[in-house]
Amino acid sequence: MNLFDRVGRLIRANLNDLLRRAEDPEKVLRQALLDMKAAYRSAKSEVASAIAELRQLEREEQAYLEMAESWRNRAKDALKAGREDLAREALKEAKQAEALARGFADQIDQQREAVERLKVRLKALEAKISEAEGKMKTLVAKKKSVQAAEAVRRLDAHLEADSALEAFREMESRINAMEDRHQALVELDEAADLEKAFEELQGDDLEAELDALKKELGQA
C-alpha cells in the first residue's frame, strides 16, 4: 500500500469515527481539513525523500562513469608504457564500472518516473485541500445562517406562546380605553363651555330688552 492510499484510509477512518459519534458538522469539516493537511505534509516529506534518493542514484552513476573513464585513461597509459597486461586489467575495471553505472541508470529511470508520479499526486492533493478550504468556508457560513434562522424561529414560537404578549395586548386595550375616556371628557367640557356662552349671550339680550321697556315707560 503506497503513501497516498495509507493517508486516504486514515482520513476516511477519522471521518467515519466522527460521524459515528454524531459530531458537529463544522467540527467534522475542520478535522477533515486538518487530516488532509497532515497527509499533505507527510506526502511532501515522502516526495522529498524520493527526490533525495534520485539525486543519490545520479551521484552514484556519475561516480562509476568517472571511474570507468579513469580506468580507460590508465589503460592508455599502460599501453604507452608497453604494459599490455596492465592495460587489459584496466579495461576490465573500466567495463565493470560502466556496467555498474548502467545499473544505476536503470534505477534512476525508475526512480525518476516514481518521483514524477508522486509530484502529480501531491499537486492533486494540494488542489483538493484548497477546494476543501473553500467549501468549508461556504458550509460554515451556511451553517451559521441556518443556526441564526433557527434561533429566530424558536424565539417567534416562544413569543407566540408566551403570556407576556397577552399582557401587552391587555395593557394596550386599557390604554386605549383611557384615551377614549379622556377624549369623551374633553368633548363634554367643550360642550359645557359652548352652553355657557349661549346662556351669557341670552342674558345680554334680556338686559337690552329691559332697557328698551324702561325707555318706553319713561323710566330710563
Image (cartoon, helix red, strand yellow):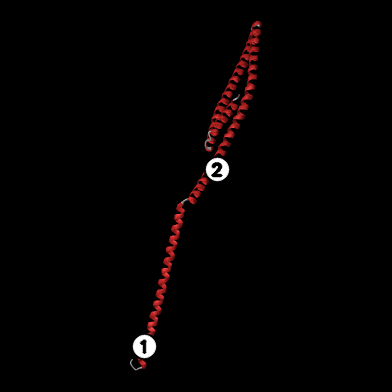
Q: Label 2 is placed on what type of residue?
A: Lys
- What residue is pinned by disc 2? 142
- Can I make out residue 186 in this image? yes
Crowding near pointer 1: few (<14 within 10 Å), some, many (20+)? few
Q: Which mark is residue 201?
A: none
Rendered location of residue 112, percent (x, y): 63, 24
Please, is residue 19 above or below residue 61 in the view? below
Q: Secondary structure at mark 2?
A: helix
The answer to which of marks 1 and 2 sits earlier in the sequence is: 2
Rendered location of residue 156, percent (x, y): 50, 50
Q: Quadrant of residue 202?
A: bottom left
Please, is residue 213 above or below residue 146 in the view? below
- Whether label 1 touches label 2, CB < 8 Å: no
Rendered location of residue 120, percent (x, y): 62, 30
Is 165 on the left or on the right of 52, as rendered?
left
Rendered location of residue 218, percent (x, y): 34, 94
- Can I make out residue 32 in this image? no
Assign the C terminus to one quadrant of the image.
Answer: bottom left
Assign the N terminus to one quadrant of the image.
Answer: top right
- What residue is pinned by disc 1? 210
> What residue is shown at x 59% (from left), y 32% (from top)?
125
